[in-house]
Image (cartoon, rainbow, N blue to C red):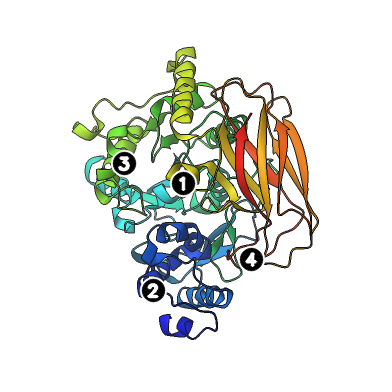
Amino acid sequence: MQERLSRAPTAGRVSARLAQVLLALATLGLGGTLFFWHLASERAELSVDSLGTEQRQALVRELLESSPGIHRSTWFEPRIAYTLQPRREHTAWQDTFTANELGYRTHPVAKPPGALRIVFAGDSWTFGMWVSEAESFPARLEALASERAGGPEPVQSWILALPGYNTFNQIAALETFFDRLRPDAVVLGVTTNDVSSSLSVLPDGSLGPPRSPVDSFDDPWPLEYRGLMTNSFVYLERWRAVVRAIAGLERRLRERSVPLLVFFTGLWDERFAQKLIAESGIDAPYLVTPEEVTRPDWLNPPPMYHGSPRAHAVYARLVYRGLETPFGWAPLEEAPEIAGVTVRHRAELGEEAVRAGDQALELHTRNRVLPRFEPSRDPTVKLQCLAGVDPATGLAGRHAALLMRREAERERLAIRLRRADGGSFPYPMEVDVFVPSARGGTRGSARLGRDGPETLELEVDLPPDVAPGVSFEVIFTAPRATVTDGSLVPRSFYIERIEQL
């Protein structure tokens, strides 16, 4: 690839290391490769800033040729969004496996006679991203239960999970395939990024950016919180939608006499998980992964940041504990990693759990959400960019979203925008700005002209019902976008700065 790119008419060579990194990430699909591009750009020898338009196009072409996408769109049920291409061998996420007839890394659909089948619905953590199928916690639970449970029937874990799924994708897949899978129990793996919009499938089978509103959040724009926990109105409304969906799933499973275990896996603050349960209509038992086994030494190295094989062994013991009662399994001996972890129910929680969860969100917001925005490679700025914004440059697309924390005695936002030159932009372009809140939010707009000043400034009132210390989204919408020399994906304008006045 390096040789091919070096022949491009535009100046500059692509470093061999950059090519190797991007090709390694190509198994994530084009969307995943672009997502991790900024990680590769952190160091000067991996910078792509010097690449010209033709070099960028050649690089993307080589990525697609080297690793054609492994996903397929679920046209028969759009709420699922995608599966893997079925009945094919795939090499992805440091594993080589054959997807079954439904497109999942797990057992065949046919249920073995007399088997006790546990269906695990979830995302990358339940899938076991960056570990082999045998090392994933559902597979380890199968082995553990078969060895220790003491029941007459064989136990089978069926992994209905894929990287990138949110709760709505998981529930849609479970209900679509329920009659074929015939589960005896369901374990729903809930992670902190389950309020992110559904990913889309590009024509080559790679995963691309979210396209709203196919994921049932009822927002007209896609959002991706990347595991961030905060107290904004939009964020909490999306979690309320998730919790309602889980409660509805529980009712439907109860009608079929199928028990449900809710497993908060991944990087959770237990106080927030308990707040969600306390405010829900969920009666199913739940477990929260202990904070001790979410520390860096329990995770795979960056950029993976998922549970290591050692962590998956602990997750399996947690799930075993959650299923002991409904199946009458023999209790496991206590392990230090899960000492003190108990299976809990909503009835045990009260207003104190809600207050503790609110305090936890306030702390996370104060520590991780900035009160202003200015493009930077700082990791906190990257978390601040929820959709359609390059954190390093501020280059924004048709739908762009940022997260900010309100400061005391501030009433307005001062926003500076800049025209995005270098593409075939049909200016003038009207840019709308929306700050949502429980009482409707506030709006503003600005027009970027074809001629005249390249930058403009506008002010937008802050919603009066957003209190100091509470976070809020700033949503930008433009009528069109194009591809510029500085980006591989469509963009519309630059966000240079947002301050509170």
The three-letter amino acid code for the residue at tag 1 is Gly
Residue at the spot of label 1: 122
State how far apart marks 1 and 3 are (Cα): 13 Å
| Dot placed on the residue nearer the N-terminal end, 2 or 4 | 2
Disc assigned to residue 315: 3
| Dot placed on the residue nearer the N-terminal end, 1 or 4 | 1
The three-letter amino acid code for the residue at tag 4 is Thr
The three-letter amino acid code for the residue at tag 2 is Ser
Q: Nearer the viewer, mark 2 or mark 1?
A: 2
> Residue 192's x, y, as percent?
47, 39
Secondary structure beneath label 1: strand
Q: Nearer the viewer, mark 1 or mark 4?
A: 4
Secondary structure beneath label 2: loop
- In the rendered structure, are the residues bearing label 1 and label 3 in contact, judged by CB atoms less than 8 Å apart? no
State the image quarter where residue 459 is shown: top right
Disc assigned to residue 484: 4
- In the rendered structure, are the residues bearing label 4 and label 3 in contact, judged by CB atoms less than 8 Å apart? no
Residue situated in front as seen by the camera: 309 or 59: 59
Residue at the spot of label 2: 15
Q: Residues within 10 Å of mark 2 (few under 14, many from 20)?
A: some
State how far apart marks 1 and 4 are (Cα): 37 Å
State how far apart marks 4 and 3 are (Cα): 45 Å
Secondary structure beneath label 3: helix
| Dot placed on the residue nearer the N-terminal end, 4 or 3 | 3
User: Horizontally, is 138 left or right of 179 in the view?
Assistant: left
> Residue 310's x, y, as percent?
24, 47
Q: Residues within 10 Å of mark 4 (few under 14, many from 20)?
A: some
> Residue 137's x, y, as percent?
32, 47
